[in-house]
Image (spheres, rainbow, N blue to C red):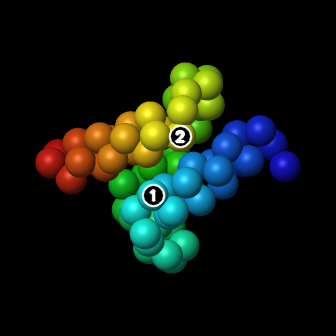
Amino acid sequence: MSKTLKFKTYCIEAYKQAKGLTGKEVQALFQKYNVLDYISEFYELLHSTSESYIIDDIDIYIKARQSA
């Protein structure tokens, strides 16, 4: 398993726990807003931050995409 795939899995699980969502709900949300592509693109920055920063950053990214 690649390091980015491991990190994506970590982000999905952390987001799921933080937001009280199911795996399917997170999958649908991340797919709708291309969150996994975002995580891949900014892997170098994100993987060195805290879990709360990652969750907040994903929220900001999703909200920006909803507004667009």
Residue 38 x, y percent position in the rendering:
47, 40
Using the numbered discs, state the Cα–Cα distance from disc 1 to disc 2 in whole angstroms.
10 Å
Residue at 46% across / 40% down in the picture? Answer: 52
| Element at label 1 | helix
Residue at 66% across / 54% down in the picture? Answer: 9
Q: Nearer the viewer, residue 3 or 32?
A: 3
Residue 55 x, y percent position in the rendering:
43, 45
Q: Amino acid at mark 1?
A: Ala
Q: Amino acid at mark 2?
A: Glu
Residue at numbered disc 1: 18
On the picture, is 15 further left or further right than 66? Answer: right
The single residue placed furthest to the right in the displayed view is 1
Residue at numbered disc 2: 51
Can residue 28 be seen here? The reply is no
21 vs 45: above or below:
below
Q: Nearer the viewer, residue 17 or 45?
A: 17
| Element at label 2 | helix
Contact flag, marks 1 and 2 (Cβ < 8 Å): yes
Which quadrant holds residue 7? top right
Residue at 61% across / 25% down in the picture? Answer: 48
Pointer 1 local density, CA inside 10 Å: few below 14, some 14–19, many at least 20: few
Pointer 2 local density, CA inside 10 Å: few below 14, some 14–19, many at least 20: some
Residue at 17% across / 46% down in the picture? Answer: 68
44 vs 62: above or below:
above
Ranked by sequence position, the earlier of labels 1 and 2 is 1
Residue 65 x, y percent position in the rendering:
26, 47
